[in-house]
Image (cartoon, rainbow, N blue to C red):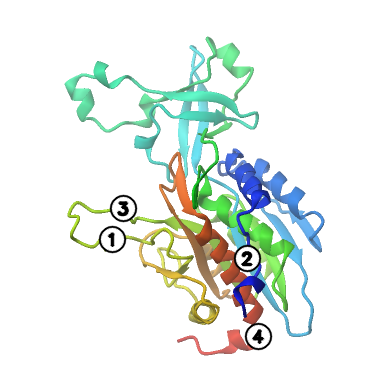
Amino acid sequence: MADHTIPGPRANRAHLRLLHQLTEAVAVSGDEAAVRAIVRRELAAFADDMHVDALGNLLVIRKGCGRRRVRVMLAAHMDEVGLMITAVEKDGTLRVGRVGGLDVRQLAGKPVWVGRARHVGVIGVKPIHLLTASEKKKALSLDNLRIDIGADSREAAQRKVQPGDRATFATPFARLGPTVRAKALDDRLGVASLIELVRSPPPGIDLLAAFTVQEEVGLRGARVAAFALAPQAAIALDATPARDFPIWDEETENTQYNTRLGAGPAIYVADGATIGDPRLLRLLVETAESEAIPYQIRQPGRGGTDAGAIHLTREGIPSISLSVPARNLHGAASIASLKDWRDSVRLVYAALARLTPATLRGRRS
């Protein structure tokens, strides 16, 4: 199949505008409404069925043609790591708790958006030149940080913010040459990809799109979605760390990377939550090589995706993960390659176009 026949985001203005909107939405785990609203708007005209389940997952079904089509679940999580307001202090500052795998060391001095109204704030910390010698030796604690939204009293702050509201980094989306910079590329890249695949689905399958919630706090939405959709196979579309920076010795190869930026979408053999189904692994690798789509194998190790919950649902669901590499994930500003993103959608589309019931009846190893 020629390269130009495989659909996928071409990083044109419309695709970048959508990714811009998705990344700048505030959707910390448990409050994914802002992203869910964008997805519903984008897919209302394409869905054969669309509904929100009790946990908040947005489930979209796009039926295919033919008698031998496979029911395939594609999952992309809508939530991001961030903070939850736990108390409003007398002076109007906000005490916070962590939601998901957020590195406290990255928080000091960062601008944030608070609540669905996106109130602007900043995470305050004692200036370094005022720290005592003993304070400099201590690890930064969340208890030492407060969000300042410019309120001068508890009453003034409570007119804008309440305990339970979420906060996340106020990082504007930007294109940087062949890459994009944004917060929450984990997993708004996957959400944008899944939107594109629902709009232009692969032939011969029933596409069961699950835009899931609460992935960052335990893969919770995916378990519920997989039980409801009861697919025959599943692929989690996510983002994964690109630990491809140099190491101390410039003459020594960095062998500690998970993935590398610009080397193509990352196919998972295994991670901390899943061993990829070997039939789906072969399908993705053989498709990539046949279609001349760049790919890399995500190095086994810690971490996990929605596939970790999906493959254990019901009597077991053959599952695998495909991710876009990105630097600085779970931080204020991540970087991802537009070509890796585009190629990830091309690979999923081409692989699913080849998927038949016989694929899943094949040998497991």
Residue with the mark numbered 4: 357
Q: Are marks 2 and 3 in contact (CB under 8 Å)?
A: no
**Residue shown at 39% from the left, 62% from the top:** 259
Q: Position of residue 242 (x, y in %)?
A: 39, 56
**Residue 228 appears anywhere in the view:** no
| Amino acid at the residue labelled 1 | Gln
Query: What amino acid does circle 3 point to?
Result: Phe
Q: Spatial distance from mark 1 to mark 4, Cα to Cα?
A: 38 Å
Disc number for residue 298: none
Residue type pointed to by label 2: Leu
Q: Choose top left, top right, bottom left or bottom right for residue 44.
A: bottom right
The residue identified by callout 1 is 256
Which element type, helix, strand or loop, lies under badge 1? loop
In space, the residues marked 2 and 3 are separated at their CA atoms by: 31 Å
Q: CA distance from mark 1 to mark 2?
A: 29 Å
Residue that appears at 40% across and 47% down: 328
Label 2 crowd bin: few (<14), some (14–19), many (20+), radius 10 Å: many
Q: Return the mark for residue 245.
A: 3
Along the polypeptide, which appears first: circle 2 or circle 4?
2
Residue type at mark 4 is Pro
